[in-house]
Amino acid sequence: MRTLLRLEILRMLRNRRYLIFTLAYPVAMYLIFGSQSGDVDGTDVAAYIMVSMASFGAVGATLSAGVQRIAAERQSGWTRQLRLTTLTGRQYVISKLASAAVVGLPAIVLVLFTGFLRGVRLDPWQWGVLVIALWFGSFVFAVLGIGLGYLVAPDSAQPVFMLVYLGMAVLGGMWVPLTGFPRLLQDIGHVMPTYRLGQLGWEVLAGRHPRISDIAILALYLVAFTALAAWRYRRDEQKVAA
């Protein structure tokens, strides 16, 4: 499994599309929108957008590692070949989760480092908690990516990824704070996993630790997405065996 994990990470890091879209894109978005002055709910807007874009980057990196990669492997027959080896299904899924987690971390760190260079100043504990909270929170989307990778047809993986990624980002308040939305969209946004991920960081900016309620809701999403991934993986396995 270690060999497969190392291969997965190297393949992602050598993918220029991944590097540009999941690493450079969130940083570019922060550079564009992070120069605004003012505050959002009492938080400096530059720091608020920094956390939003770090969350946005983490979701994109982990989600892409599952949806597009698995769909491409199904189309090429790579998953069928792996099932002929001694690698178990659990080891395969764990390697996917681990590789998604590894490639998601740089997306967070790069945006936070850019924010620091642009003058965002936080206490040392806040920087540390931000990285840890957003990173662990992004595991939810890594699992969702695996489920979607086995759910959608390979030819539909790219548009589905973009629809889910950008849709959850907008509805979760990563681009525009939910307070600027109509009431109905605010209610929808509050239950989105992207909003709860962002809340982990926004609470830290306010000098507080992440709320138990946000962690609990993300945990529920993790359970639901894990069930989806397990179901679709078994269905794909049965289809191959047939």
Image (spheres, rainbow, N blue to C red):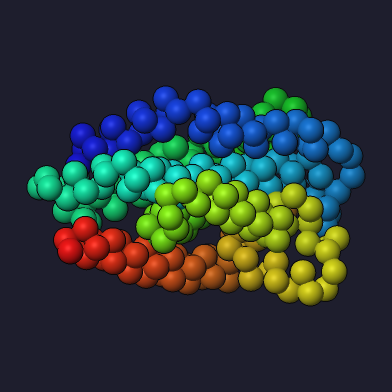
Q: Position of residue 135 (x, y in %)?
A: 49, 47
Please tell me in which quadrant of the rendered image residue 227 appears: bottom left
Query: 210 above or below 188?
Result: above
Q: Residue furthest right?
A: 38
Left/right of residue 226 with respect to residue 93 in the rendered view = right
Left/right of residue 187 with respect to residue 25 in the rendered view = right
Query: 6 above or below 185?
Result: above
Q: Write the residue at 63% across / 58% down.
A: 168
Is residue 13 in sight in this rendering?
yes
Q: Position of residue 223 (x, y in %)?
A: 41, 69
Is residue 207 in sight in this rendering?
no
Pick whichever, 97 or 80, lies toward us: 80
Query: 202 above or below 213?
Result: above
Q: Position of residue 85 (x, y in %)?
A: 11, 45
Q: Position of residue 233 (x, y in %)?
A: 30, 61
Q: Residue furthest left?
A: 86
Please tell me in which quadrant of the rendered image residue 170 appears: bottom right
Q: Write the residue at 61% across / 29% down.
A: 24
Position of the N terminus by quadrant:
top left
Q: Write the residue at 41% across / 33% down.
A: 12
Q: Write the residue at 38% across / 43% down.
A: 72
**What count of labels does the image hold?**
0
Please tell me in which quadrant of the rendered image residue 186 appears: bottom right
Position of the C terminus by quadrant:
bottom left
Pick whichever, 139 or 78, lies toward us: 78
Left/right of residue 229 with respect to residue 23 in the rendered view = left
